[in-house]
Image (cartoon, helix red, strand yellow):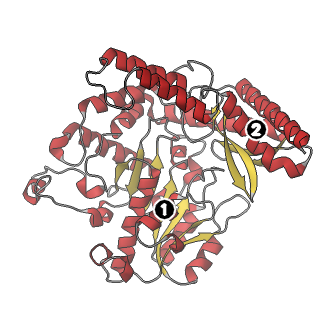
Amino acid sequence: MFADSPSGRPIPPGRPADVLARVTAVLTDGGMLGDVPEHGIGADAALALVTTVLTEGGVDLTSPFAAAHLQPPPLAVAVTADSLASAGNASLDTYDSGPAALAVERWVVAALARLAGFGADADGVFTPGGTLSNLTALLLARDAAAARLGLDVRSDGVAALPDPVVLCSELAHFSVARACAALGIGEHAVRTVSVDSRRRMRPDALAATLRAGGTPVAVVATAGTTDFGSVDPLPELAEIAREHRVWLHVDAAYGFGAVFSAKLAALVDGLALADSVTADLHKIGWQPAAASVLLVRSAALFGPLERSVAYLNPEDDRAEGYDGTLGRSLQTTRRPDAVKVAATLLALGRAGLGALVDRCHELAGHAAALIAADPSFELVGGATLTTVVFRYRPADESLADEVNARLRRALLRAGAALIGRTEVDKVTCLKLTLLNPNAREADLAALLALVREAGSAAERLLEGAA
């Protein structure tokens, strides 16, 4: 189902500058860097060279010690289907640029919308990633907020929209602020809402923030925070958003994959109450990047993106059914990323994907238990989905931030392990993001042993320097 790790190492050893220089040297020797070669080296030699570069100098996500990011090893069936999609070179903007690919995307979007609990009016579109899915959702929300006031910001500009605000939890993804900047309402429009002890947005705090004034553009709930996998209380937030007549967007880039699992699906109850939902299947879904989807409860919500262009989709052609997805996306040319998702859904089904989700959740729970039982570590956040946040505990607590930062870099430099890093309450922490269903409990114990050894070494170095 997944490829085997070719080297066992998750990343090549060495300092970043040295690793990048080695890759550059390989390409230069092949005459591929700098000036474009006059005659080239031939397809076989070029592919062999690129294969060498990627295997010897790249990341190996099939290694059980690759646990840094929401970046899974891709399923073999998805990789193969993705190659077929590339070979066909279809685009989704118009019917005549790829009819089969268009039908595949519509089928996948409808299937995912049903898994989310949306009704027959739902629609959606694939995007290059959760950041662009969130941007598109907030664009639709911005225009809907303006329309409620009788304004047309698309034509007249956002200056006409008085004091716009977007509300999200203090743990929301940074792409919310980035989207506000791109949409012209500014990052200062973002008002963060405090979270509870389970790191979920507090409904009472959201209601109070909405009463504080401004023109609410959207409430952005998070289903699967990047660090903790925590899921905001969607039904309660949806009720508040409905009372205030404000768009509810759920950023489920991480957590949407829970819908595949019979055990974990209840975590994301309430998705169907949203106006829009972001889902990234290149996270929990084991797809090659990119495979993000923006789902909306009604196709009519895509209205602000409608476009009829004479050389692509003139109105009379559209009336006869010769239409694509130009009116659903900020992109024009758009590759058929849904093909690999379709192949995966057909090959594994919901139960097959659910088994992978459950296995990674079990691994995260086991890692949390190992960390909690080890006096060398402090468990900071344990396994809601597939992430575990923790710290190495040096004897001198004043060295903790520096030791944790150094040990992670030491593991990277040795090529021994890929673990994540974050900050919780202004304290440097480590993170395991466990998305390799082939990893074993023994691999987790070995990985934590590497972390412990690297922490001890960093501790000794700092104590010696002091």
Q: Secondary structure at mark 1?
A: helix
- Amino acid type of the residue that numbered disc 2 sits on in the rendered structure: Leu
**Tag nearer the camera, 2 or 1:** 2
Specify the quadrant of the image occupied by residue 346: top left
Can residue 17 be seen from the camera position used here?
A: yes
Residue 255: where, in percent of width, then height? 55, 49
Q: Residue at x 22, y 37 (%)?
A: 100
The mark nearer the N terminus, 2 or 1, is 1
- Residue picked out by circle 2: 407
Residue 371: where, in percent of width, then height? 80, 39
Q: Is the residue 6 above or below the residue 287 in the image?
A: above
Q: Residue at x 24, y 62 (%)?
A: 306
Query: Observer-nearest residue: 109 or 98?
Result: 98
Tell me how many marks there are: 2
Q: Secondary structure at mark 2?
A: helix
Q: Is residue 158 left or right of residue 455?
A: left
Q: Is the residue 150 above or below the residue 426 in the image?
A: below
Q: Is the residue 131 above or below the residue 89 in the image?
A: below
